[in-house]
Amino acid sequence: MAKEAELELDFEGAMERLEEIVRELEHGDVPLEKAIDLFQQGMKLSQLCGNKLEQVERKIEMITEMDGELRKKPFGARLEGDSDEPV
């Protein structure tokens, strides 16, 4: 897989390709050189998926109930503080 194609993959596309690679490697009749290449592709795709998940995690907002009001906070933010926005 070309590097340009890897960068253009969305999360679902990367996961689908990663699953194809795993199936191919599990089949067991892959020549050694191809297996190494597939493994390297899989590692890159795994890293790409991890990075995309981290980006999404930063965007997620939790809704918490504080003092009888619903407030939204960035994912991972502490539950106390003045930066809460009322919903």
Image: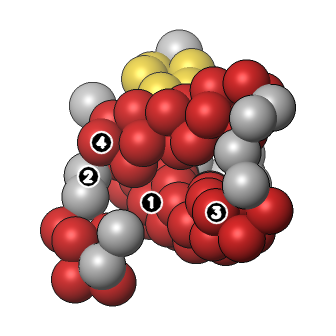
Amino acid type of the residue tagged 1 in the rendering = Lys
* CA distance separating discs 4 and 1: 12 Å
The front one of 25 and 73 is: 25
Location of residue 86 in the rendering, given as x and y in whole percent from the top left corner: 32, 39
Q: Which residue is mark 1?
A: 52
Marks 1 & 2, CB-CB < 8 Å contact = yes
**The residue tagged with tag 1: helix, strand or loop?**
helix
Report the disc number at residue 13.
Answer: 4
Q: Nearer the viewer, mark 3 or mark 1?
A: 3
* Residue matched to label 3: 34
Mark 3 or mark 4, earlier in chain: 4
Identity, as a three-letter code, of the amino acid under mark 2: Asp
What label sits on residue 10 in the rendered view?
2
Tag in front: 3 or 4: 3
Asked whether residue 50 appears in the rendered view, the answer is no
Q: Earlier in the sequence, mark 4 or mark 1?
A: 4
Q: Which mark is on residue 18?
A: none
Mark 1–mark 2 Cα distance, whole angstroms, equals: 8 Å
For marks 1 and 2 on the same chain, the one whose residue lies earlier in the sequence: 2
Q: Amino acid at mark 3?
A: Lys
* Cα separation between marks 3 and 1: 27 Å
In this orientation, which residue lies closer to the viewer: 37 or 78? Answer: 37
Give the mark nearest the N terminus, 3 or 1. 3
4 or 1: mark nearer the eye: 4
